Amino acid sequence: MAPSMDERFREASRRCEQAGQQHLLRFWEALDATERNALLDDIDRIDFRPIPDLIERFILRKPAHDHGSRIDPAIVDRRNESGASQAAALGRELIAAGKVAALVVAGGQGTRLGHDGPKGCLPVAPVTGKPLFQLFAEQIAAAGSRGGRALYWYIMTSPANDAATRAYFRERNFFGLDPADVLFFEQGVMPAFGFDGKILLEQRHRVALSPDGHGGTLLAMVHSGALADMARRGIEHLSYFQVDNPLVRCIDPLFVGLHAERGCDISCKVTPKANDHERVGNVVVADGRVSVIEYSDLPESLATARNADGSRRFDASNPAIHLLSRRFIENLTADPARFALPWHRAEKKVPFVDLESGRRVEPSTPNAIKLEAFIFDALPLSRTTPMLLEIDRAEEFSPVKNATGVDSLATARRDMVRRAARWLEAAGVQVPRGGDGDPSVPIEISASAAMDAGELLARRDELARIRFDGPVLIG
Ligand code: UTP
């Protein structure tokens, strides 16, 4: 029998009190039944056990990140090295055998972009306006059809966007995928804290909660049953990518093959940096372990260091594309109650309810601390040295983070068009270009037509007939 409202209230009070957060129920008497339920649901979502300790370590103090005493450059693999074709063949075999599934993390809030609704619904394709989710769905379908077997796709959402994401897939008929091959799962949340260690109320009946970071993926897979689902299906590797990168190769046979050949727990693609101080994560070796150091934490002497030939010494940035083996996730999370990736602390502006007046306050300066875990912090936990595959950023990475300027919808579309033009040119097509050097019309290549430049070569005859007198769609 479901517990009554009174029972739920008593349990919530007990949990809040134990963690010193009884103020979350301050306005209980003034709430109606719907509001009370909403508040209890929020409180239920919080894991209060670690909260007192987190407050001590991260909220009342500002811990410095310890990246170890010795930082060396990471050793990377390149696409054209010898053995690449064997590795790619192994990758294709594993994909065709159903051992690899895709995983997109789509639980973020997209605050910088300010888009209403899940980011994956954002129309991004330069000619058709297909949304991000559709681009990935089409790639996953195409990768499956190449191997003769439909691939499985895990989609991580958050409590805030789960219903909208599922509804969107239903409305669009799963973009042609079999719904049985798509599994949505929700990630966990973390409350926002005031500087005094008190969890903030966003409204009198709502706790200020946000998703717990893409590092939350690992535990969310355990709690949701997605990890057990992988095991049941015999899936051994997850091809992890983020929802905001329309150029990503959702499943890359070479990456899979190299990862599997080396028996890696986790692998990571890397790209050369645009400049010494680019705002990216740096993939380095810290005290002998592959790790990611945020640009703000990389000492200046290392950011500007050069090799003897003048090239940048620390030149591997993290575009957030990984392979994770199921065994690794199972090992890390064998005792879920004791597993946590490190927390990263960020000071933010979070609207809150003043506990004295009951009024909502919109702060003009940061008033709160949010804690997030990052998936790349799993790299140093790997039992085997992670494989790092260098990629060409122009081919595989152009995230939509901001509404305008760098890493925006406009730059992602531009980069999709530029890539399509390069693939066409590699197939011998003359692409007209304007004075700025960019193609003079929008061009889009759908995944069913080609997933890389090589695949486009097979359609040479058809390509010869393209007229560039308007937007070009190769689909
Ligand atoms: P970002 O770190 O860019 O965050 O996420 P964001 O939420 O999308 O955007 P901002 O920072 O609020 O502007 C990178 C990827 O990780 C996912 C996002 O959905 C995106 O695919 N992510 C992030 C999660 O799935 N969960 C999270 O808690 C955070």
Image (tube, rainbow, N blue to C red):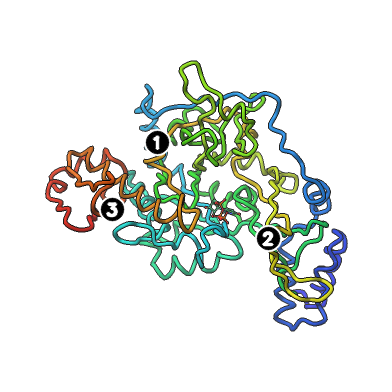
Earlier in the chain: of badge 3 and badge 1, it is: 1
Secondary structure at badge 3 equals: strand
Q: Residue at x 23, y 37 (%)?
A: 426
Judge depth for marks 2 and 1 and give the one in front: 2
* Above-or-below relation of 352 to 156: below
In the visual, does 67 lie left or right of 50? left
Q: Residue at x 68, y 63 (%)?
A: 364
Q: In the image shown, does 70 or 36 lie closer to the viewer?
A: 70
Q: In the image shown, does 377 or 395 lie closer to the viewer?
A: 395
Q: Residue at x 57, y 59 (%)?
A: 111
Q: Residue 201: x percent and y percent? A: 75, 68
Q: What is the C-alpha distance between the residues marked 2 and 1?
A: 36 Å
Q: What is the C-alpha distance between the residues marked 2 and 3?
A: 39 Å
Looking at mark 2, is its residue's CB closer than 8 Å to ligand 1?
Answer: no
* Above-or-below relation of 204 to 347: below
Q: What is the C-alpha distance between the residues marked 3 and 1?
A: 19 Å
Q: What residue is pinned by disc 3?
A: 444
Q: Which mark is residue 349?
A: 2
Do tag 2 and tag 1 residues touch (Cβ < 8 Å)?
A: no
Q: In the image shown, does 37 or 229 lie closer to the viewer?
A: 37
Q: Residue 166: x percent and y percent? A: 49, 66
Q: Residues within 10 Å of mark 1 (few under 14, many from 20)?
A: few
